Amino acid sequence: MILRKVLPILIAFFLFGGQAQGQKEYKVERLNGGINTSGYDEISPVVSLDGKTLYFTRIAYPDFDKTLVEDGENLYETLSTSEYESYIRNIYSQISGRSEYDITKSRFNQDVWIAESTDGKFDKVVHPGYPLNNALPNSISALTPSENELITINQFVKEGGMKKGFSIVRKTSDGSWTFPEGMQINNYHNSGPDVSITMSADGEVLIISLEREDSRGKSDLYVSFRQGEQWTTPKNLGSKINSSYRETTPFLSEDKSLLFFSSDRHGTIGGNDLFMVERLDDSWTNWSQTRRFVEPINSKGHETQPFFNSATGYMYFTSNRNGTNDIYRAKLAGANPRWVTIRGRILNSKTGEQVSAEVLSGAKLSSNKNIYVSDDGTYEMKLAKGIQYEFLPKKAGFTGRTEIVSFKKRYAYFKTYNIDLFLDPLEEGAVLALDPIYFEQSKAFVLKSSHSVLDELATFLNENLNIYVEVSGHTDNQGSEKSLIKLSQDRANAIKNYLVKKRSVNPLRISAVGYGASQPIADNKKENLRSKNRRVEVKITSVEDTNITAGLKSKGKKKE
């Protein structure tokens, strides 16, 4: 893993074992006054992958978004000032478990702020309004693989209300933000006050700080894996990382090899110190010795919320070493981006027009996928190097063509790559491009390895109830005409039976036809060509005039 090459430098310069040398090699920088204010707390730094945008949280600041929705009504606009403040005090007190008297000074008065810069100074600071912010606690917690999506704390309901958990927010093409959409983490519960999460650069893994029945201390670090649209039950990372103290605010490096976090365990020089640990294999149970960052990164104050940005080599973090919580950074390594930017258009393959659509992405779309929502027919993402990704545009009334993209891990890429994605309109006569469906040799028994292809087809048919299809079986010319017709018909019937009996597709919407060797797509003189004729096709025979709600993938070309 590339980041492991940096690890010896980090250990030599920043961790115990190289303390004296480390103090000569680097400095800690407090970010500018546009970000860090006098007398107020700034926390939770999250930096975009290119290092040019900083998201942070400002606490107990007079200029906070006062939107408070209850039963679809903004109470800030309908209640008197005293009634509104009393209402907010009651909410903050319920969250805190103790009386909150001044809503402005309450630690639950939290808003997201955004700083941008082209030269690393972060001098363009803006304060977004509703729905990214409201009168309840708001904070950006982590990045997602999609360039326009982020993870926030808490879950909200449009009609009013808040509960524990995390949400996804998306920035649209006009610069506005969508309403936070709750993340579904199986068996999620947290009895502690700490709320923090990190997502891997490929969108497959979450590390969460939680206090649960199996926690070793007040808060432990847990791992959760993407499982379709949801996430698995959080699993404790074990005693090599977690202690009888508090482990909080995790950050996972882009290649998933290094885990940064904060803890108040034995041996810290302040309240909370920053630590780092290396994952030694592909499991999430085998870790190196936990190592603590030395002074001046850690101080006699509290250091939390580490966030390492490989594009700049800076680690950002929160510290109260000067009395209030401020955001600092320290240069840990040289600039070494571990991702590549891709962007492109989503096009109607028939008209060439840009189409607003979703873009599904992931190492395996059949099991795990991230969703990028495009409202203007364009998309932009950053991909971790060394991982092969699939991309599939999805739009009602279309089938999407899958693109397979990968970038070599040890190469340096210095430009943005343009990759257009295509949607084929669903229409009569269109052939659905499926991955190959495999049968037992000379039999009509579908192998288990092809069940996922049939499940994908069934999902498509069940989501598009106005589509009627023909499943056709085809063979090469090796055998008698009668036996080839029978084999191809039996295989078409086997697919129909699977869709009907195992996936509840209406049988009236599927016809099964065996064509034998009568419709070759290649010459039968050589085996490598004959194999192309042994195939199953699914063709749309009819499209009723009703709404179409989903798309099916088709294969594209690998790009590298």
Image (spheres, helix red, strand yellow):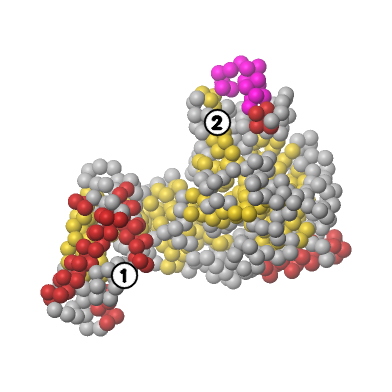
Mark toward the start of the polypeptide (1 vs 2): 2
Residue at left offset 78%, top offset 49%: 264
Q: Splitting the image into 4 quarters, where does residue 105 fall?
A: top right
In depth, the one of 452 and 236 nearer the eye is 236
In depth, the one of 97 and 198 nearer the eye is 97
Identify the image quadrant of the N terminus. bottom right
Residue at left offset 55%, top offset 51%: 233
Q: Which residue bears the numbered disc 1?
A: 438
Secondary structure under tag 1 reads loop
Where is 284 relative to 326, above or below?
Answer: below
Where is 189 relative to 485, above or below?
Answer: above
Q: Position of residue 548 (x, y in %)?
A: 30, 46
Magenta stretch: residue 69 in it? no
Would you say the magenta stretch is mainly helix, strand or loop?
Answer: helix
Q: Which residues are magenta?
A: 75-91
Q: Is residue 33 left or right of residue 478?
A: right
- Graded by Cα atoms within 10 Å as few (under 14), some (14 to 19) or many (20 or more), the crowding at tag 2 reads few
Residue at left offset 20%, top offset 69%: 488
